[in-house]
């Protein structure tokens, strides 16, 4: 049993190394995804801003056309003034001209606001496009560096997995199954040291009789508190 426990300790060390490297790999994969998402986010923003700009341009053209129409209305009304013969008609035309000029003034103000919005949005789009170009220029080298680290980790995981498989072949299947179940329940730690009357897995005191049995027996002993497999370790 002691030989099997030593093999389980070795197996656990390999499992923890593999777990750690899988964690590192996932972190790197998340970094790759974050880089792609950052570029995609800027692309979406640029696309949305361009659509917004297109709408503003349509509104500007519509205002310009309305302004042309009002200028034509004013010109026609003012031309009619020369043909008017009665005071009543003259007052009516003056009223038309006054209303048209007021509408023209409002349109000119709206048009100026729209042009200002277009100018500001165009500047924002230019800045975003510059940011996007910079990201796209640098992202390939960043992703290549991260991918290199992922490839290295995968190679190390492969080596550890082969060593794990070789070690597991020397351990009875029933013990391996128990070890796997404990690892799943106890955050990856199934085999722990018993030292100075304590379980190093849960830091609880072991019953003296159970602890003393570790000196005498070659049977599997479990911590009564955390159920992990105990391996006796004595201070030098």
Image: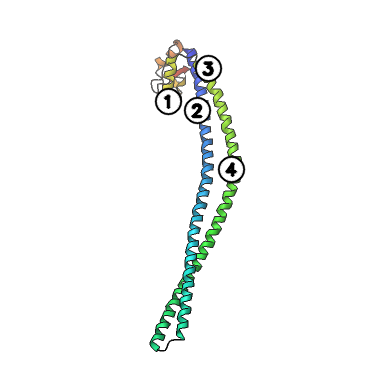
- Mark toward the viewer: 2 or 4: 4
**Residue 19 — which label?**
2
Which image quarter is the C terminus in? Answer: top right
Q: Which residue is mark 1?
A: 184
Q: Which residue is mark 4?
A: 139
Mark 4 and mark 1 lie on one chain; the one further toward the N terminus is: 4
Secondary structure under the numbered disc 4 in the rendered image: helix
Mark 3 and mark 4 lie on one chain; the one further toward the N terminus is: 4
Mark 2 and mark 1 lie on one chain; the one further toward the N terminus is: 2
Q: Which residue is depicted at the point 50% across and 16% down? A: 7
Secondary structure under the numbered disc 1 in the rendered image: helix
Q: Which residue is depicted at the point 50% across and 58% down? A: 54
Q: Are marks 3 and 2 in contact (CB under 8 Å)?
A: no
Q: CA distance from mark 2 to mark 4?
A: 28 Å
- Mark toward the viewer: 3 or 2: 3
Q: Which residue is depicted at the point 53% across and 61% down? A: 120
Q: Are marks 3 and 4 in contact (CB under 8 Å)?
A: no
């Amino acid at each position: 049993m002691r030989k099997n426990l030593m093999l389980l300790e070795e197996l656990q060390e390999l499992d923890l190394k593999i777990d750690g490297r899988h964690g590192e790999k996932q972190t790197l994969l998340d970094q790759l995804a974050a880089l792609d998402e950052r570029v995609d986010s800027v692309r979406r923003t640029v696309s949305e801003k361009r659509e917004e700009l297109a709408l503003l341009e349509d509104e500007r053209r519509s205002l310009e056309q309305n302004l042309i129409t009002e200028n034509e209305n004013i010109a026609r009304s003012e031309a009619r003034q020369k043909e008017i013969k009665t005071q009543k008609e003259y007052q009516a035309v003056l009223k038309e001209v006054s209303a048209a000029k007021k509408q023209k003034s409002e349109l000119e103000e709206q048009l100026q606001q729209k042009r200002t919005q277009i100018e500001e949005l165009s500047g924002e789009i230019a800045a975003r496009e510059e940011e996007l170009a910079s990201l796209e220029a640098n992202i390939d080298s960043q992703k290549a560096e991260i991918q290199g680290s992922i490839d290295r980790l995968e190679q190390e995981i492969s080596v550890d997995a082969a060593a794990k498989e070789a070690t597991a072949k020397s351990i009875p299947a029933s013990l391996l199954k128990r070890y796997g179940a404990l690892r799943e329940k106890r955050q990856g730690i199934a085999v722990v040291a018993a030292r100075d009357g304590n379980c190093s897995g849960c830091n609880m005191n072991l019953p003296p009789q159970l602890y003393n049995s570790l000196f005498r027996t070659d049977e599997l002993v479990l911590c009564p508190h955390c159920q992990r497999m105990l391996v006796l370790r004595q201070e030098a």
